[in-house]
Image: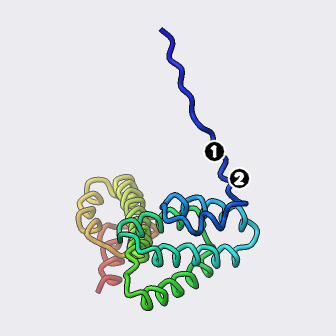
Amino acid sequence: MFVEFQFPIVKLVDYQQRLSELENDGNPFATVIMAHLAALNTTSDRNERKVQKLALVRRLYEQGLEEQDVINLFAFIDWMMTLPAELEAEFDREVQQLEARQSMKYVTSIERNAREKGKEEGKKEAKKETFIKGISLGLRLKFGDKGRDLLPEIEAIEDVDTLEAILEAIETTATVDELRQIYQTTTE
Protein backbone atom coordinates (compact mmCIF):
# COMPACT_ATOMS: atom_id res chain seq x y z
CA MET A 1 0.00 0.00 0.00
CA PHE A 2 1.29 3.41 -0.96
CA VAL A 3 0.26 6.67 0.79
CA GLU A 4 0.95 9.99 -0.80
CA PHE A 5 0.78 13.32 0.99
CA GLN A 6 0.65 16.65 -0.75
CA PHE A 7 1.21 19.91 1.05
CA PRO A 8 0.58 23.35 -0.36
CA ILE A 9 3.64 25.53 -0.22
CA VAL A 10 3.46 29.17 0.79
CA LYS A 11 6.32 31.62 0.82
CA LEU A 12 5.50 34.41 3.23
CA VAL A 13 7.71 36.86 1.36
CA ASP A 14 5.30 36.55 -1.57
CA TYR A 15 2.78 38.43 0.59
CA GLN A 16 4.98 41.54 0.47
CA GLN A 17 3.01 42.73 -2.58
CA ARG A 18 -0.28 41.95 -0.81
CA LEU A 19 0.23 44.06 2.34
CA SER A 20 -2.94 46.11 1.83
CA GLU A 21 -4.89 42.88 1.57
CA LEU A 22 -3.32 41.63 4.82
CA GLU A 23 -4.04 44.92 6.58
CA ASN A 24 -7.73 44.60 5.77
CA ASP A 25 -7.92 40.95 6.77
CA GLY A 26 -9.27 40.22 10.26
CA ASN A 27 -7.66 36.78 10.37
CA PRO A 28 -5.03 36.59 13.15
CA PHE A 29 -2.64 34.89 10.72
CA ALA A 30 -2.62 38.07 8.65
CA THR A 31 -1.00 39.73 11.68
CA VAL A 32 1.49 36.87 11.97
CA ILE A 33 2.48 37.27 8.31
CA MET A 34 2.71 41.06 8.68
CA ALA A 35 4.98 40.66 11.72
CA HIS A 36 7.23 38.28 9.79
CA LEU A 37 7.46 40.65 6.83
CA ALA A 38 8.07 43.66 9.09
CA ALA A 39 10.85 41.76 10.88
CA LEU A 40 12.50 40.94 7.56
CA ASN A 41 12.16 44.51 6.27
CA THR A 42 13.59 46.14 9.39
CA THR A 43 16.63 43.99 10.16
CA SER A 44 18.99 46.92 9.59
CA ASP A 45 16.77 49.73 10.91
CA ARG A 46 15.80 49.24 14.56
CA ASN A 47 13.95 52.56 14.78
CA GLU A 48 11.72 51.55 11.89
CA ARG A 49 11.26 48.15 13.56
CA LYS A 50 9.93 49.91 16.65
CA VAL A 51 7.51 51.92 14.49
CA GLN A 52 6.31 48.78 12.67
CA LYS A 53 5.99 46.82 15.92
CA LEU A 54 3.88 49.57 17.45
CA ALA A 55 1.69 49.70 14.35
CA LEU A 56 1.07 45.96 14.60
CA VAL A 57 0.17 46.20 18.29
CA ARG A 58 -2.15 49.15 17.58
CA ARG A 59 -3.79 47.01 14.89
CA LEU A 60 -4.43 44.26 17.48
CA TYR A 61 -6.36 46.69 19.65
CA GLU A 62 -8.27 48.16 16.74
CA GLN A 63 -9.41 44.77 15.49
CA GLY A 64 -11.39 44.17 18.66
CA LEU A 65 -9.87 40.74 19.27
CA GLU A 66 -10.41 38.82 22.48
CA GLU A 67 -7.96 39.70 25.25
CA GLN A 68 -6.19 36.32 25.11
CA ASP A 69 -5.82 36.59 21.33
CA VAL A 70 -4.25 40.04 21.74
CA ILE A 71 -1.87 38.66 24.37
CA ASN A 72 -0.89 35.66 22.24
CA LEU A 73 -0.40 37.67 19.08
CA PHE A 74 1.52 40.33 20.96
CA ALA A 75 3.82 37.65 22.41
CA PHE A 76 4.50 36.45 18.87
CA ILE A 77 5.14 39.98 17.57
CA ASP A 78 7.39 40.66 20.55
CA TRP A 79 9.38 37.49 19.87
CA MET A 80 9.58 38.12 16.12
CA MET A 81 10.54 41.81 16.37
CA THR A 82 13.07 42.15 19.17
CA LEU A 83 14.41 45.61 19.95
CA PRO A 84 17.50 46.92 21.74
CA ALA A 85 16.83 47.82 25.39
CA GLU A 86 16.52 51.59 24.89
CA LEU A 87 14.07 51.20 22.00
CA GLU A 88 12.17 48.54 23.93
CA ALA A 89 11.72 51.02 26.78
CA GLU A 90 10.39 53.64 24.32
CA PHE A 91 8.10 51.03 22.79
CA ASP A 92 6.75 50.07 26.23
CA ARG A 93 5.97 53.71 27.03
CA GLU A 94 4.16 54.15 23.72
CA VAL A 95 2.16 50.95 24.26
CA GLN A 96 1.15 52.19 27.72
CA GLN A 97 -0.10 55.43 26.13
CA LEU A 98 -1.99 53.40 23.54
CA GLU A 99 -3.55 51.27 26.27
CA ALA A 100 -4.63 54.36 28.18
CA ARG A 101 -6.46 55.61 25.07
CA GLN A 102 -7.95 52.19 24.30
CA SER A 103 -8.96 51.38 27.91
CA MET A 104 -7.50 47.91 27.44
CA LYS A 105 -4.72 46.58 29.57
CA TYR A 106 -1.68 45.03 28.02
CA VAL A 107 -0.98 42.05 30.25
CA THR A 108 2.12 41.07 28.31
CA SER A 109 4.09 44.08 29.59
CA ILE A 110 3.35 42.96 33.14
CA GLU A 111 4.39 39.44 32.21
CA ARG A 112 7.57 40.75 30.60
CA ASN A 113 8.48 42.80 33.67
CA ALA A 114 7.80 39.78 35.87
CA ARG A 115 9.98 37.65 33.60
CA GLU A 116 12.84 40.16 33.86
CA LYS A 117 12.50 40.25 37.63
CA GLY A 118 12.45 36.45 37.68
CA LYS A 119 15.61 36.30 35.56
CA GLU A 120 17.40 38.66 37.96
CA GLU A 121 16.28 36.63 40.95
CA GLY A 122 17.36 33.45 39.19
CA LYS A 123 20.81 34.90 38.51
CA LYS A 124 21.09 36.00 42.13
CA GLU A 125 20.03 32.54 43.35
CA ALA A 126 22.52 30.82 41.02
CA LYS A 127 25.29 33.12 42.25
CA LYS A 128 24.33 32.35 45.85
CA GLU A 129 24.42 28.60 45.16
CA THR A 130 27.86 28.92 43.58
CA PHE A 131 29.22 30.84 46.56
CA ILE A 132 27.70 28.36 49.03
CA LYS A 133 29.32 25.43 47.18
CA GLY A 134 32.67 27.20 47.18
CA ILE A 135 32.35 28.13 50.84
CA SER A 136 31.37 24.56 51.74
CA LEU A 137 34.42 23.17 49.99
CA GLY A 138 36.71 25.82 51.48
CA LEU A 139 35.40 25.22 55.01
CA ARG A 140 35.83 21.47 54.70
CA LEU A 141 39.35 21.73 53.29
CA LYS A 142 40.65 24.42 55.63
CA PHE A 143 38.81 23.78 58.90
CA GLY A 144 37.44 20.23 58.65
CA ASP A 145 34.38 19.41 60.80
CA LYS A 146 34.51 22.73 62.65
CA GLY A 147 34.21 24.54 59.34
CA ARG A 148 31.28 22.43 58.21
CA ASP A 149 29.44 23.32 61.43
CA LEU A 150 29.34 26.95 60.18
CA LEU A 151 27.57 26.00 56.99
CA PRO A 152 23.95 26.18 58.29
CA GLU A 153 24.58 29.75 59.52
CA ILE A 154 26.18 30.76 56.24
CA GLU A 155 23.44 29.16 54.12
CA ALA A 156 20.91 31.41 55.88
CA ILE A 157 22.69 34.51 54.55
CA GLU A 158 20.85 36.01 51.55
CA ASP A 159 23.27 38.81 50.64
CA VAL A 160 25.54 37.64 47.80
CA ASP A 161 28.19 40.27 48.58
CA THR A 162 28.50 38.90 52.11
CA LEU A 163 28.79 35.36 50.75
CA GLU A 164 31.50 36.50 48.36
CA ALA A 165 33.36 38.15 51.27
CA ILE A 166 33.14 34.91 53.26
CA LEU A 167 34.50 32.89 50.35
CA GLU A 168 37.43 35.27 49.93
CA ALA A 169 38.06 35.38 53.69
CA ILE A 170 38.44 31.60 53.99
CA GLU A 171 41.89 31.92 52.47
CA THR A 172 43.13 34.58 54.91
CA THR A 173 41.44 33.67 58.20
CA ALA A 174 43.19 31.38 60.63
CA THR A 175 40.24 30.18 62.70
CA VAL A 176 36.53 29.45 62.41
CA ASP A 177 35.79 32.21 64.94
CA GLU A 178 37.71 34.72 62.84
CA LEU A 179 35.65 33.77 59.80
CA ARG A 180 32.38 33.96 61.78
CA GLN A 181 33.34 37.45 62.91
CA ILE A 182 33.60 38.59 59.27
CA TYR A 183 30.04 37.72 58.36
CA GLN A 184 28.53 38.66 61.69
CA THR A 185 29.86 42.21 61.39
CA THR A 186 28.61 42.59 57.80
CA THR A 187 25.09 41.36 58.60
CA GLU A 188 24.57 43.55 61.69
Q: Is residue 113 left or right of residue 11?
A: left
- Counting from the top left corner in percent of width and height, residue 77 is at 54, 66
Which of the numbered marks, if any, corresponds to residue 10? Answer: 1
**Local SS, label 1:** loop
Q: Are marks 2 and 1 in contact (CB under 8 Å)?
A: yes
**Mark 2 — residue?**
14
On screen, residue 121 above or below 58: above
**Local SS, label 2:** helix
- Counting from the top left corner in percent of width and height, residue 12 is at 65, 52
The amino acid on which the numbered mark 1 sits, given as a three-letter code, is Val
Task: Please name the colour scheme applied to the rendered image.
Answer: rainbow
| Residue 117 seen | no
On screen, residue 9 above or below 109: above
Residue plotted at (41% across, 68% down): 71
Q: Quadrant of residue 178?
A: bottom left
The amino acid on which the numbered mark 2 sits, given as a three-letter code, is Asp
